[in-house]
Structures are given as structure tokens and as C-alpha cells.
Amino acid sequence: MSAVRADAAPALRPLRESDLDAVMAIENRAYPFPWTRGIFRDCLQAGYPAWLLLEGDAVSGYAIISLAVGEVHVLNICVAPERQGRGLGRFLLRALLKHARDRKAERVFLEVRPSNPGAKALYESEGFNEIGRRPRYYPARDGREDAIVMAMELVDGEVERMPPL
């Protein structure tokens, strides 16, 4: 993986199967129970919208969503642990929300672990609300962990009104 230049602005491009080595390297560092390469490959083969987050030529994160009539589900959104805390997750999330709105989605759903307060705070700060729980949804060291289900209603022009990063 390339070193990140200090002046490299974040950019997105479509995620390709050839990117999976870089994606898996981040996924394995970021999560104690990472997705498998097969899950990523299946998402790409199913045609789910997916992006690679780049800073210069360095891979800093990625995101995958599913899109159905009127709804988007954030399946995976991740920033490399060493790049977190710099606004890249917010940049990636806002790009997903813009994509959703551009496709006429009316709401966006996601699940987040209660043990990931940073992600939950990010989602809440961008307008997501907790709408429920999925009991024992995630694997955890001591068995299973619930998922907090969050949702956001999309309104025309909403992304443009967000404060700058």
C-alpha cells in the first residue's frame, strides 16, 4: 500500500475485484470479525454499488450499498484504522447519501454495533436515527452482539445543505 501524501484530497472511484487485496488488508485491520473476500466478490458480482476511497494513489477505505426501489442499505463502510478521525468516514458517508438521493431513494438504512460508538455518533451527526435492534446480529468475542438499526429519510437538496467537511 502506498504512503498517503499530506496534500492528497480524498476521491472515490468504483470498486473493482482487482482492488480486493487492498480492501481485505483494511477490512482485516479494522474489524475483529471481517467480511470474507467471497462476500466482497459476491457483492460486486451482484452489481451492488461500491466505491474505493483514495488519497492520491493510496487506498484509505471503501463502501458498498444495496439499492432497491426507494431504499438504500449501507452494507459496509470502512476507513483504514490509521486514517480514521480525519473526516474520511463522513466524506464517504456523504457520497453514499448523494448517490442514494440521485437514484431517488427515499430512505437509507444501516446497522451498527453498540460497541462502535464512533460510528454511531457519525451516523447520528449526519441525521440517522435509531429505529430498532437486531438481537444477536453480529459475531462477538463472547458470543453475539446486537445491531442497532438506524435510518435516515432523504429530502431533495439535503446533501447540498450539509455543512462543509
Image (spheres, helix red, strand yellow):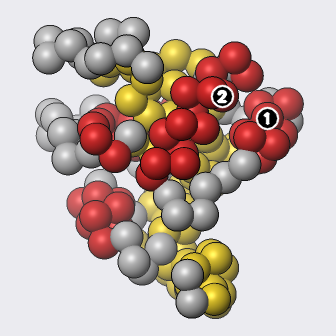
Image x and y of residue 40, in percent: 73, 40
Could you tell whether 3 is left or right of 78 in the image?
A: left
Determine whether the residue tagged by mark 1 lies in a helix, strand or loop.
Answer: helix
Q: Label 1 amino acid? A: Arg
Q: Give the numbered dot on residue 41.
A: 1
- Rendered view: 137 above or below 119: below
Characterize the local packing of mark 2: few (<14), some (14-19) or many (20 or more) Cα atoms within 10 angstroms: some
Residue 80 seen from this side: yes
Image x and y of residue 150, in percent: 48, 70
Characterize the local packing of mark 1: few (<14), some (14-19) or many (20 or more) Cα atoms within 10 angstroms: some
* Residue at mark 2: 20
Q: CA distance from mark 2 to mark 1?
A: 8 Å
Between 164 and 41, the one nearer to me in the picture: 41
> Which quadrant of the structure image shows residue 89?
top left
Q: Earlier in the sequence, mark 2 or mark 1?
A: 2
- Rendered view: 28 above or below 53: below
Between 163 and 85, the one nearer to me in the picture: 85
Between 86 and 81, the one nearer to me in the picture: 81
Could you tell whether 82 is left or right of 50 in the image?
A: left
